[in-house]
Image (cartoon, rainbow, N blue to C red):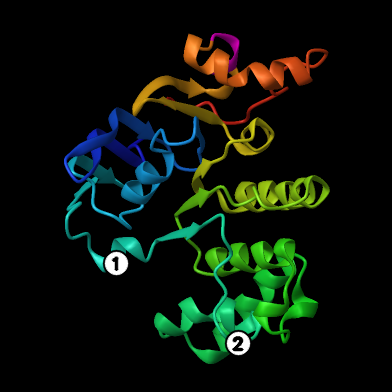
Amino acid sequence: MTNWMEFHHFTCKKSVTTIVTLDHLSISKGQIIGIMGENGTGKSTLLKAMSLLEPPAAGTMIYKGKSINITTPPLSIRREWACVFQHSYRFVGTVFENVEIGLKIRKVRKKDRYKRVMMWLDKFKIPHLANVQAHKLSGGEAQRMNLARAFVLEPSVLFLDEPFSALDFPIKMVLLEELQQVLTETCTTTFLISHDLTDIEFLASHLLYLYNGKVTDKGRIHDVLLSPSPQLKSFLHPWHKARSSQSLIPSSQSLSSEF
């Protein structure tokens, strides 16, 4: 089967300084890639380049078997992807209008827009907030809205940059469960940046660890956590210490594709 996405010699720079380099990465449809690393190691820079929000300095991206122009990517490709960030982006208007906006830009019929928006508000447990002004939402409600706004577009690839970091633990765990179910149902290929191993363990099938702009660990999360690099082992030490009586390795992983 053709890889869903591939990255070759993918380099991100700021000014003339190389921030992060990704020599090779192949992704199959439906894989969920957790990206971890110390602060300042280039995680968000890499994600922005992968999602083509910012142009990478060099490299090749292949999507669904076709090479993509990374300097001027086609709008049709970018419209197949969606992003959710740490800070909630709320447009002026109601929750319904916030979730609907991407469909209006794509000129989806009003009747179809209503059905799709309400379906995703329901999936993320906020249909009762449809007519509430977005600026009145709590942090957890706002991230539910943001996820609904992403999924209503039916993206083939989803990019998540620390989407749970501002949420209280109980709220985060409930949202993680709901998101896990949605990702399973939709088979959406996902890249997830998080500083919290809990998020990665809960959602990811594979793990990418960055250290000083380089990939030191890459593979199925089960395998990576069994035999981490010294850099990853040091990074994970707080979790080892806090959960010394528990296994860091997820009990099962359903995806078996190569990474």
What amino acid is labelled 1 in the image? Ser
Who is closer to the viewer here, 239 or 100? 239
Residue carrying label 2: 93
Residue 81 seen anywhere in this rendered image of the structure? yes
Asked if 71 appears above or below 122 in the picture, the reply is above
What amino acid is labelled 2 in the image? Gly
In percent of width and height, residue 92 lies at 56, 85
Mark before the other along the chain sequence, 2 or 1: 1
- Main SS of the magenta part reads helix
Who is closer to the viewer here, 32 or 134? 134
Residue sitting at 36 percent across and 42 percent down? 46
Asked if 175 appears above or below 249 in the picture, the reply is below
In percent of width and height, residue 12 lies at 26, 41
In percent of width and height, residue 119 lies at 68, 72
* 159 displayed left or right of 178: left
> In the rendered view of the protein, which quadrant contains the C terminus?
top left
> In the rendered view of the protein, which quadrant contains the N terminus?
top left
Label 1, residues with CA under 10 Å away: few <14, some 14-19, many ≥20: few
Residue interval drawn in magenta: 223-227
Mark 2 falls on what kind of element?
A: loop
Who is closer to the viewer here, 152 or 176? 176
Residue carrying label 1: 76
Residue sitting at 69 percent across and 72 percent down? 121
Mark 1 falls on what kind of element?
A: helix
